[in-house]
Image (cartoon, rainbow, N blue to C red):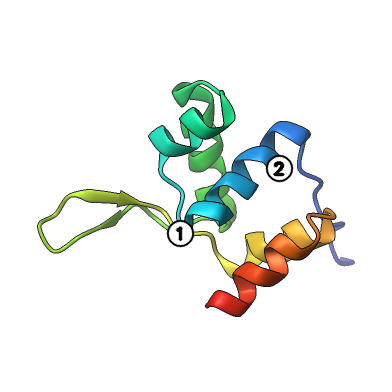
Amino acid sequence: MGALASPRLSDREMRIAQAAIARGRFVIREIAEATGESRDWVNDVAKRWQVLGWLTQVQRNASGHQIGRHLTPTLSALLGANGSGGQADEADKAD
């Protein structure tokens, strides 16, 4: 079987991915507010991206409170392939 073609993100998905990069994490409420998308839709995307390996599981602080997910290198590479420009490059440098 040959290599799979790189999936393309929709404009809506690009906006939420870029918002997550700008924040350094993927928090449903913050991403929804920043992009004007519904929390339900952003949550559905986060779950799908987690299954694809593009986001980590929900992270928790020392007190057990949820602090959001992190973008994986796979999503960062995909953003570069989708033409996000320097933002993905800058996120890679920050790690």
In the picture, the disc for residue 1 is none
Position above or below: 41 against 2: above
**Residue at left offset 78%, top offset 55%:** 84
Image side of residue 81 versus residue 16, left or right: right
Position above or below: 64 against 45: below
Q: What residue type is disc 2 on?
A: Met
Label 2 CA crowd tier, 10 Å (few <14, some 14–19, many 20+): some
Q: Which residue is mark 1?
A: 70
**Residue at left offset 39%, top offset 33%:** 29
**Residue at left offset 46%, top offset 33%:** 43
- The quarter of the picture where residue 75 lies is bottom right
Residue 26 in the image, given as x and y percentages of width and height: 46, 49
Quarter of the image with the N terminus in it:
bottom right
Secondary structure of the residue carrying tag 2 is helix
Image side of residue 3 versus residue 61, left or right: right
Q: What residue type is disc 1 on?
A: His
| Mark 1 or mark 2: whose residue is earlier in sequence | 2
In the picture, the disc for residue 14 is 2
Residue 54 in the image, given as x and y percentages of width and height: 58, 56
Residue 85 in the image, given as x and y percentages of width and height: 81, 60
C-alpha distance separating marks 1 and 2: 16 Å
